[in-house]
Image: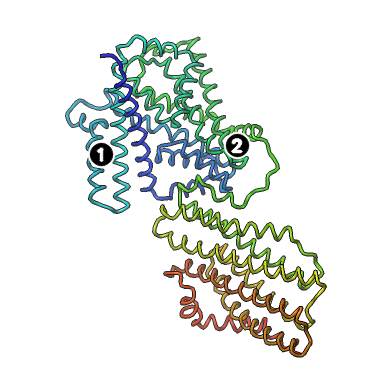
């Protein structure tokens, strides 16, 4: 029976099953490990050897060097990892990706005994049992842990069922002389590399490409001389995924993709020269012999291990080549580049990145507050361009971070959902602080344009309130940045004093208006600024209470109930209020009219 259309359909179907099984098995393993692997990968990149080991482990677990490399590109693009740190991860990923081929070799003839038990335990036979157990777990138990185990079992089983289907589909090729002639042609090293690179680039998985070659090797028509250049080409072709991932990223993200490319390209060229130099001088006894699945797996592993060892002392060379291929350019870093879409696959890291962006919002809001109030008490010129830049960032950040958090939500572990809720609250409060700073800035602009100003008493009173709000904002932002309940607990007492200051300043200013000491032209802006300062205090208090609740494991996010019944009832709170009363209210007596 020859190779017909149905064989081609079965080959395509088998490949689809193979890739699907590999994907869901990797996802199951990744979910079972939680976010620990990716989080550890982020932290263990300071040393190239540690980065290599972690890159290897993560890739072995998720069954994809492309996914690990894309993760590294994402880390670099988001500023979590430097280009130099990513090199070790990429080296390790190339070793880790060989695990799939080594698993598939278990079905090689002679790999296991011929007894019934040994035959049953062969992956291609045991695959059906694993799929059955996995499906039963899916149908009977709904817990996340069991679902992950089910995904691993089903994925592993489907992987080998797909492999067996491909082997069955290509078996008629063994009798076709044209097939042998084709691979004799591919024995040309350049053509072999191009074929391997092309196929891998199309399916974007070196593991799947190696799996296809292993399936074809069961025909006995593929020799070592044909397989070796194809395997080298497969390592080059897998770079396409990182290239596609880096499009639109920062220059260092694009450089990370180039590191991956140069590693595989230079490694393949060196290996090709070395192998063919030996073959044409000494010669390999096995060169024209048929290669099997085990031989393909071993050569794939040997190549990646030896090239990694070769490059370990020369990681700086890879960085140098990447930096000169993607030259430096004038680019202003976008603070929101931390919201890296590639990190959504690892929710805990994506959540940390969103947290950092919200902290940037706090810093921007604090900066704009200072830009708004400082010109009230000095002859400093206003800085409208800088203020507008920060305000635009706050508006854009509120929208972009909220979108990012919505995408993270569905995949978050239950233990992180409270933090997720807190972040949605906090980003809104920081944006509102920016809005009230905008109101103050506009009031100051009008006062300057009309050459108006406050009375001496009004200005000194307002300075006290602005100083109190400034300290309140500093503690709010610092508490949020450091996730510190002790710092955040100092915010609400100051906010209480700010409320007192608002009432006092409002009454005094109305009295000054009645006495004719201040004009209506300056009286209304004064009251508006006092109102805006008090509102800034309210939103800062909300953020501080969210910080306390999260740091101390409180349930829910009812800020009013929390501040009224728990926080304000403590003796420490009353002592703090008294301290800030002395600090800010005591001086008001000096300015009484």
- 3D distance between C-alphas at marks 1 and 2: 41 Å
Q: Is residue 372 above or below residue 36?
A: below
Q: Is residue 437 above or below residue 401?
A: below
Report the number of discs.
2
Q: Which of the pair 565/403 is nearer the observer?
A: 403
Q: Which of the pair 420/583 is nearer the observer?
A: 420
In what element is the residue under mark 2? helix
For label 2, count other residues whose C-alpha is less than 10 Å away and answer few (under 14), some (14-19) or many (20+).
many
Q: Residue 244's spot in the image, x, y percent?
A: 53, 35
Q: Residue 470's spot in the image, x, y percent?
A: 66, 71
Residue 536, by quadrant, is bottom right
Which tag, 1 or 2, sits closer to the chain's start? 1
For label 1, count other residues whose C-alpha is less than 10 Å away and answer few (under 14), some (14-19) or many (20+).
many
Q: Is residue 165 left or right of residue 50?
A: left
Look at the image and tell me in which quarter the N terminus lies: top left
Task: Check disc 1 and report the residue beneath it.
Answer: 131
Residue 132, by quadrant, is top left
Find the residue positioned furthest to the left.
Answer: 116
The answer to whether any part of residue 459 appears in the image is no
In the image, what residue occupies the spot 59% across and 77% down?
A: 495
Q: Residue 178's spot in the image, x, y percent?
A: 36, 10
| Numbered label attached to residue 585 | none
Q: Which of the pair 315/553 is nearer the observer?
A: 553
Task: Check disc 2 and report the residue beneath it.
Answer: 255
In the image, what residue occupies the spot 25% across and 39% down?
A: 131
Q: Residue 437's spot in the image, x, y percent?
A: 66, 68
The answer to whether any part of residue 128 appears in the image is yes
Q: How is the image coloured?
A: rainbow
Q: Is residue 587 left or right of residue 39?
A: right
In what element is the residue under mark 1? helix
């Amino acid at each position: 029976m020859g190779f017909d259309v149905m064989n081609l359909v079965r080959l395509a179907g088998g490949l689809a099953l193979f890739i699907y099984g590999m994907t869901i098995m990797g996802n199951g393993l990744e979910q079972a490990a939680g976010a620990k692997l990716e989080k550890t990968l982020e932290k263990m990149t300071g040393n190239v050897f540690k980065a290599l080991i972690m890159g290897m482990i993560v890739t072995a677990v998720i069954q994809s060097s492309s996914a690990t490399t894309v993760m590294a590109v994402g880390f670099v693009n988001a500023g979590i990892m430097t280009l130099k740190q990513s090199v070790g991860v990429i080296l390790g990923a190339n070793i880790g990706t060989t695990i799939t081929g080594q698993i598939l070799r278990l079905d090689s003839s002679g790999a296991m005994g011929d007894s019934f038990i040994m035959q049953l335990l062969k992956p291609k036979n045991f695959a059906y049992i694993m799929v059955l157990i996995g499906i039963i777990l899916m149908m009977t138990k709904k817990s996340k842990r069991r679902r992950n185990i089910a995904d691993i079992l089903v994925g592993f089983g489907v992987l080998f069922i797909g492999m067996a289907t491909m082997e069955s589909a290509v078996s008629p090729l063994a009798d076709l002389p044209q097939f042998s002639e084709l691979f004799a042609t591919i024995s040309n090293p350049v053509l072999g590399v191009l074929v391997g690179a092309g196929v891998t680039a199309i399916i974007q998985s070196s593991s799947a490409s190696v799996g296809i070659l292993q399936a074809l090797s069961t025909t006995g028509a593929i020799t070592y001389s044909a397989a070796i250049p194809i395997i080298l080409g497969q390592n080059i072709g897998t770079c396409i995924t990182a290239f596609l991932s880096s499009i639109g990223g920062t220059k260092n993200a694009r450089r990370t993709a180039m590191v991956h490319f140069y590693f595989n390209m230079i490694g393949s060229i060196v290996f090709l020269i070395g192998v063919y130099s030996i073959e044409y001088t000494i010669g390999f006894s096995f060169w024209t012999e048929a290669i099997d699945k085990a031989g393909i797996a071993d050569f794939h592993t040997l190549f990646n291990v030896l090239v990694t060892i070769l490059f370990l002392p020369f990681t700086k060379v890879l960085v140098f080549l990447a930096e000169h291929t993607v030259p430096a350019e004038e680019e202003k870093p976008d603070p929101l580049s931390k919201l890296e879409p590639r990190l959504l696959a690892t929710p805990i890291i994506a959540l940390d990145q969103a947290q950092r962006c919200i902290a940037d919002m706090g810093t921007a809001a604090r900066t704009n507050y200072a830009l708004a109030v400082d010109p009230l008490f000095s002859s400093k010129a206003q800085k409208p361009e800088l203020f507008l830049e920060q305000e635009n960032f706050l508006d854009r950040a509120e929208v972009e971070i909220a979108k990012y958090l919505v995408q993270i939500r569905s995949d978050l572990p239950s233990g992180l959902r409270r933090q997720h809720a807190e972040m949605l609250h906090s980003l809104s409060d920081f944006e509102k602080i920016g809005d009230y700073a905008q109101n103050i800035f506009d009031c100051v602009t009008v006062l300057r344009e009309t050459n108006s100003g406050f009375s001496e008493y009004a200005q000194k009173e307002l300075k006290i309130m602005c100083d109190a709000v400034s300290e309140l904002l500093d503690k709010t932002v610092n508490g949020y940045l450091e996730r510190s309940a002790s710092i955040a607990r100092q915010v609400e007492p100051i906010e209480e004093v700010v409320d007192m200051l608002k009432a006092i300043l409002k009454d005094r200013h109305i009295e000054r208006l009645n006495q004719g000491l201040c004009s209506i032209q300056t009286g209304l802006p004064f009251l508006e600024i006092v109102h805006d300062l008090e509102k800034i205090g309210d939103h800062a208090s909300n953020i501080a209470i969210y910080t306390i609740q999260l740091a101390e494991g409180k349930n829910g996010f009812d800020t009013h109930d929390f501040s009224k019944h728990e926080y304000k009832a403590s003796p420490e709170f009353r002592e703090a209020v008294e301290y800030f009363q002395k600090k800010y209210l005591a001086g008001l007596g000096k300015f009484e009219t």
